[in-house]
Structure formats: C-alpha cells, structure tokens
Amino acid sequence: MNDKLRVVHYLNQFFGQIGGEDKAGITPIDKPGHVGPGMALAAALGDAAQIVGTVICGDTYFGENMDKATDEVVELISKYQPDLVIAGPAFNAGRYGTACGAVCAAVAERLKVPVVSGMYPENPGVDMFRSKVYIVETGDSAAGMRQAVPKMAALALKLVAGQAVSPAVDGYVSRGIRENYFAETTGAARAVEMLVKKLKGDAFTTEYPMPKFDRVEPNAPIADMSKATIALVTSGGIVPKGNPDHIESSSASKFGRYSLEGVDTLTADSHQTAHGGYDPVYANQNPNRVLPVDVMRDLEREGVIGKLHNTFYATVGNGTSVANAKKYAAAIANELVEAKVQGVVLTST
C-alpha cells in the first residue's frame, strides 16, 4: 500500500516546458507525474510524498480569464485527489505569481488541503494572496530555484503534519495575521525593554514591523513653464486602438511609446485602455479622461507650456511588480532626459 502524500504541482507554460511567451495563451492542461522543476521538488519532498500530477496554464490566459482559469485549474487538480498542492516558485514573474496565488487560495478554500507557493517579496501575487496562502520568500529569478524548492518542500510537509510554523523559522512571507495571546509582560514593559536594547545597540525584534517606502527627493520647480516641454506618461493603460504592443491588462511585462505628432485629442476610434483593474467604459469613451492630451494642447496654444512632447508613454499599473515599475521608470526617464523634456504629467486611474 502506497502511503505517500499525493502532491499536485502547478506551473506556467515556461516552467511546464510548453514554451515561452508565444505559448502564454494556452488553456489549462495536466500531465501525470512531475515536469520541469517538479523533479527538484520531488527530490526535496523525498519519500514522504509523490508528485502525482502537474497542472500547467499559460500566464496570459490565466491573467485574462482569472475566474474561469481558476475553476479549470482547480478542477484538473481535484481529479488527482491531492493531500497537498504546491505552485511555482514564481520568483518575480508578476502574472505567474498572481496565478499561483489565485490557484492556491482557491484550492485551500475548495479542496481543504494545505497549499504552498514561492515568490520574490515584490511580486504582486504576494500582496494579493499572502493572507490566504503560505508564500516562501525567493530570489527574483530562476537562479534561486535551488534555494527556493527545498524551503517550499519543508514548509509544505510541516503544514501537512500540522506542525507549528513561523515566518522567521520557515522562511515564508508574513501573512499579516495577528493572533491574541497572553504575554508574560505588558506591552509597555516590552516596549521599554526594546527601547533600552536599541539605545545600547543590542539586537531586538519588533512586534510590529513597519513597511519600507522609497524616499524620492522632489526636483527643483520648472523656472519658466511657458518655455518648457512637458511629456505625458500614464500607468492607466491608454494605448492606440487595438493595443499594438499587447500590453497585459495586469502585471504588465512592458511599456509602450506612442506618437502624438499632429494629435489634438484622443478619441474612442483612435485610442483605448488596456488596463484590467478598473471599469474601462469611460476611459474608452474618452481616453483624454486618463491621458489629457486635449487639455495639454489647450495649454500649449495658450502659452501656459512651451509645447507638449510628441511621444507619450504608457503601461498598466494593475498588479505590476515594483521591480518592473522601477525598470520602466528608469528607461522612460532616460529617454525624456535625452529629449530635453523639462516636466512630466504622470497620470494613473
């Protein structure tokens, strides 16, 4: 009698060895046994568990059909009657991370079995699903696969066994869940104890970690707006009709640059939004509501600004990782500096 735990592994099209971005639209499929990184996962699980099946779905298909894709993936997983489901690791791939989180959350709710995934802390899937899913912290690329998989396997086996786990010991991202318990000393006494340690330079662990935010120093004001070239940049997803660069509706993997040469206003026939995080109706009716080309042209004619830069930049902020957003910002800023643009109107949604 085989008493090994039954494990199902979820992968995207790349790690599932189907193909790259050209195969990102594939619908969910399943294969018996392990595939790709599943070999390393099987080794890490050892004799305690067996990967009985692998479910694979394209990142684009999942992102554009999240509810439907979740149902389809969970249905494929359920036929293997798993004791445990592991997704990824997704590292810093935003669409993949979102899919892993959605699959794990649905499996935990519907199939009532433990779930584990792995992601880089800045993956948008972390913020979206960390309260529902155990997400092991990984590096930002597949180069960290060798370190990530054993941690995911170890945490998964502890969860199945009902053992106590913690972020500090087991390496998963804090889930933000606060539990009541009786402490030996009051909060005031613990706070003073930490303060004394801090003043002495001793190590201590805060009970309430604060989020870390970038601090960006504002630039000097533009001396003469009437002579300045101003550019438009948006994370609201405004693109030419048909979305020629195929910018994703969530977890964008790119940005686009588009000409405004001879354009006085945006229309429903010329432009649209690619954004999947808000109701697109009003933006599609009048794209100037998100990217105010019409108003900027008015300011240009009135001499309030020198001129509107003849290229605008657009991406989708919905679910896009901080790392990718920084990368896009640096690339766009370099081009604007080279074009001698003095100011930017940055719009979101």
Image (tube, rainbow, N blue to C red):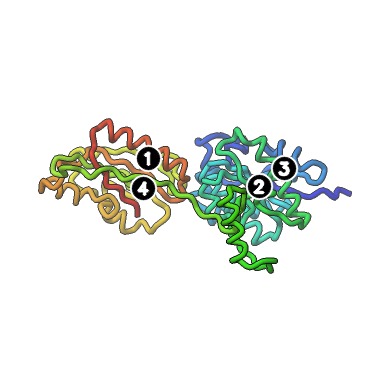
Q: Categorize mark 2 by other alpha carbons within 10 Å: few (<14), some (14-19), many (20+).
A: some
Q: Amino acid at mark 1?
A: Ala
Q: Position of residue 300 (x, y in %)?
A: 14, 45
SS type, badge 3: strand
Q: Amino acid at mark 4?
A: Ser
- Pointer 3 or 4: first along the chain: 3
How far apart marks 2 and 1 lie (CA) works out to 31 Å
Q: Amino acid at mark 2?
A: Gly
User: Residue at coordinates 45% horizontally, 46% vertically from top-left?
Assistant: 320
Q: Amino acid at mark 3?
A: Pro
Please name the residue that numbered disc 1 is placed on: 329
Q: Position of residue 234 (x, y in %)?
A: 33, 47
**Is 63 on the left-hand or right-hand side of 50?**
left
User: Residue at coordinates 73% horizontally, 46% vertically from top-left?
Assistant: 154
- Pointer 2 or 1: first along the chain: 2
SS type, badge 4: loop
- Pointer 3 or 2: first along the chain: 3
Contact between labelled residues 2 and 3, with CB atoms less than 8 Å apart: no
Please name the residue that numbered disc 4 is placed on: 235
SS type, badge 2: loop
